[in-house]
Amino acid sequence: MDKFGMHNQTEQLYARYEGTGNADTSRYEWLTNQHRDTLAHYVMDDSLAMFISIAEGNSVTRTKFNMLERMQQPCGPPPKTEDSK
Amino acid sequence: MFLYTLTLNAPSVISHAEVGHFSGGKRQELAIVRHQQHLELCTVDTNSGQMGTEHSQNMFCRIRSIAAIRLPGGSKDYLVLGTDAGALTIVEYTGGKFVAVQHHEFGRSGLRRQVAGQYVVADPRGRAVMVAAVERTKLVYVVTRDGEAQVQLASPLEAGRAQTVSFDVAAVDVGFENPVFAALESAYGETQGAKELAYYELDLGLNHVVRRWSAAVDSSAHRLIALPGGGDGPSGVLVCSAGAVEYRHNTGTARRAEIPEQAQALVVASAVHRMRGAFFVLVQTEDGTLFKVTVTCTAELEVTGVDVALFSQVQPAAALCILRAGFLFAAAGGGQQLHQFASLDGGEGALALVDEVEGAGPVVRSAVHNVAREDAPQLFALSGRGAQAALAVVRHGVEVAELAVAELPDAATGVWTARAADAGDAGLIVVGLPQATLALEVRGDVAEVTRTGLATDVPTLCLRRLTAGASDGSEAGPLVQVTPHAVRLVHTPERVSEWRPPNARAIACAAIGTRHVAVALARSGGQIVCLELHAGTGALVELPRLPEAGSDVSSLAVAARGTTGAAVVAAGCADSTVRLFAAGGVRGVAEALGVQALDAEPHAVTLIDAGGALGLFVGLVTGVLVSATVDAVSGAVDAVRARVLGAAQPVAVDAVVVAGRPAVLALGAAPWLLSYTRSGRLRAAPLSYDALAHAAPFTSDQCAEGFACVDGASLRIVSLPRPAAAFNCASIPLARTPRSMALHPESRCFAIAERDQRASLLRVVDPFTGDSEQTIELDEDDAVLTVAHVTFAESSDPTELFLAVACARGLQLRPPACASASVRLYRWAPDARSLVLVHVTPIDGVPQCLAAFGGMLAVGVGRAVRLYALGARQLLRRVQAPAAVPNVIAAMCAHRQRPDLLLVADVQESVRLLALTSAGFRTLAVDTLPRFIVAMLPLDDATVVTSDKFGNVAVLRAPAAALDLEHPPSRPCHWDIIAEFHAGDIITGMDVCEMGVAARQIILCSSLMGAVLAAVPLVSRQDAEMLRALELALRRLPSVAGRDHLAMRSSFFPVRAAVDGDLCELFYALDLASQDAIAEDIGHDTPTILKKLDDMRAIHAL
């Protein structure tokens, strides 16, 4: 079936571009990727980081550090069961 | 509607700063990135410690990181930029601007978590660069030079690991061994583990990168500081974690030191300084304390210990740089400070502040008011945080420092200065009085001098010291004084010669150039006599008679014609013209060059060098300034521009020197400074100073470059500390982070709400004196959220202003919640300088925002809008819209023209237009797009400008059907999007205002990072089309960082009906051939485009 090595290429793409979704992406995976994208954006955009840090009353460094820390597991630990979509 | 946006003032908050030799000379300079957008080259005068801005450039991208790199054997530092263009750019400062020397694309553009650019570091020996992303990607580029000594980048080598978050990257100094980069990273996913410090080694021989070494570090580690190596130091890195600094290296050595008394503090900034055979590190924690980190090592450079000791205290900075001349540069808040090291041991007085540039930032809220009743309104910005909080008063105008003021016996008719004849003498200031002349000398203070050789019992028309010898020589020649009946040549106080006009005619006006004197005879129908200093005899020689002007001459100017030594004379004539003549020179010409018609009679005229051509400035009696360029040879007048300076008051124009370049002060109703940039573009900015009558350049030991100016009977000596900055900022200090403010229109006092964690206060500030008239400390744990002025229909005086203050106890941000909340209502005391509490009304839910609405107070609580009327004991709830918005109300604003309409913004679902009907609130318009609204401003009865948290600005208009309350549509209409663009910074304040007396209205926006922007609504369709075509053509030119301009302005929503004026103004800097090519492309000619760009600023007084 896989005449042109399509499957291989797709696998490679998934490995290369973290967060690319497919039909089997679970709700948890999708959500954590959304959160990681958002958190990374906060770190990369200085004005947003400043805006958040003023609201929180923290320094910008701490705000950015907290965002990076939250990127580890933005939605908590992964669900244990397989069918947790 | 079509918007033309201009950045009037670059952002003041600095994101990054690097020190280096960017121009390639001996001088150390600072490369500064202002809010990821503007790249600036800042110079530091090592003698005076004054900071100056040499060049500032909008990069039209987000600069996320910079690194200085010097290639082996080079003497010039390049800058490596990590941007959002998905590319690595190496820029060089050359020819007065930053240009890209290498540009390598590696990924998609935009701020993406796996596209590199967040961290950029360069090998200390300039052999390689690492550029890393927040997650996974790390690319290493080998940097070399090709045969023509051009910088070359090799193909990138990948070093990233999947599912790894990078906290920081540093380049380890390993001398000339293989370059090593250290990364602070932590893996998530299946291989989740502790935070690690990893060394990536670039093998130059095999051309690949390997992860050579890694070690677990503290989980709070957040910053890496590379230490000198390669014989100068122990190499390795300092890992900063909460409250500690640890030395780590791949030898396995680990030495940890606690930061004294700051167990949880993070390191916000650091600087490493190398000295001969030694180095030291400064780190700064969140509260601004500076610590000195000392790394002790053995003779074999083996680290034996790390010590952290208190050094000093400065404001918390985003970047620290140490200059070799012994200065510490700190980019703190919206300002920048330069400290001088008094000792390297720390303690009291270790640092002395030598220069400070004040700036507003971060700006939480701002408002435009003309409190001082000046020509242009002032921008009041709530700026800074915590201890740096301030009410910043931002004015359009160049800052003026007053050095001395002296009273004169009579109103002055003019002021002139003359350089000293020899170096031992002080300069001379000559003031013309109605019937006499006063000669003054400045030695410490201003004192009259008698033995000058000048005629002091007659008025003076003009005075200047000529230049002796060759035309380019700077040797001081004789002093020339023109009185109404004679031209007096003062060689020495004892040796004076005179030239008198024929037939004892009176002199109407005169002008003196470097070697020429031009005088116009009174009531002569325009007879002008030109005299030249004879190089041999040192006497004044009459040149061949000039053609008659045909009308009485009221003002004169003279300039040298460069090559031939001839004089160009400009004569302002009573028949509303300026006539140009050429006189003298090697060929002894005496000819009319041309004539320029004016709208009104000229009052004053001056000629200055405009880089090749001559700049002609004519002040008219109607308060208009006309500027033009004159070809010195052909006399062709070009680029004629008019600018209204104020009310109909004659405009005097006086040539001065600013930043070493000739400039003009136009003194009408307000003083304006006009100068030519290096690219020949004329820039205009008002001076933040009183109206003046006359000015002359002035130099002394105390004042390197200033003006002596007169107004009435007062003589002042002033200087411009920062002539390049068109906006200046004065700060009134506050105690805590300001959140909201309201201006009382009569007393012109501001009520300001300030809050930091667990402490809030209300303050009444007089912006004129800066004094706090009253401070009201709220109870502990009572957080003030916002304030608003409100009038109540039920009040005994329906126009009386009350101040409503929203407070919450036990406030929690995510999700918004509180234990209890209230609206405190204050009444202004009769003098409107203090507040008196009327009553407190409990509110269930967090009162996020307040607004005056139809004689009631509108309170936004969660999703609901409630209207309260004034009661005796508390506010009385009248109307409620329980679900006015889908999430939480972020802002509310009553309509100015339609008192029944209320604009309500949601934190993420854009703006809704509500109408108050007899049946309660009715939603008229909703949006189709999500907008996280920060600020909004109603323009007319159907249009609103909004700004959101992602830096977008949108103009929304309700369709006519939505506003028809008689025949309401069955469901809410959708806003029409009129205009939209991405500003790249959160706009926190917007107001409609006029920036000058006769200027047209603009929308003045201030951003969180302290930038001031103008959005100019374009009136004519032709203008819009021309500027849009110009923008389109300029977008096609390569940009320095390689970020596509259209994509940048459309980062979140496609840009619509908005032209980027900053991009259009790049047209000035293009060479003539490119200008003509673009002009032809868009079907206009270059002068038309240049005039349009000039006019866009001139008619809006920008």
Image (cartoon, coloured by chain):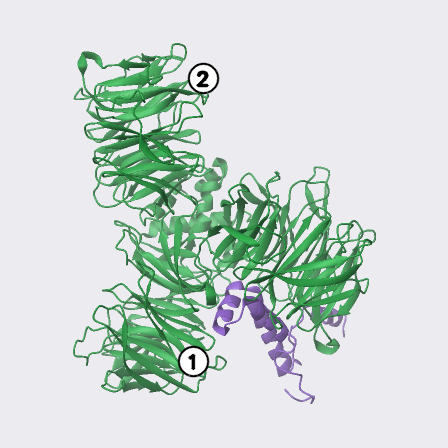
Q: Quadrant of residue B192?
A: bottom right
Name the residue: 65% across, 73% down. Answer: A19
Q: How far is mark 2 from mark 1, CA to CA? A: 77 Å
For badge 1, the amino acid type reads: Glu
Q: Secondary structure at mark 1?
A: loop
Q: Position of residue B962 (x, y in %)?
A: 30, 74
Q: Hue of chain A?
A: purple
Badge 1, how many Cα within 10 Å: few under 14, some, many 20+? few
Pointer 2 residue = B470
**Nearest the eye: B50 or B61:** B50
For marks 2 and 1 on the same chain, the one whose residue lies earlier in the sequence: 2
Residue under mark 2: which chain is it in?
B
Q: Mark 2 vs mark 1: same chain?
A: yes
Q: Quadrant of residue B349?
A: bottom right
Q: Secondary structure at mark 2?
A: loop
Q: Position of residue B847 (x, y in %)?
A: 38, 81
Work out whether residue B383 can be spotted.
yes
**Nearest the eye: B892 or B508:** B508
Q: Hue of chain B?
A: green
Q: Is residue B316 left or right of residue B1062?
A: right
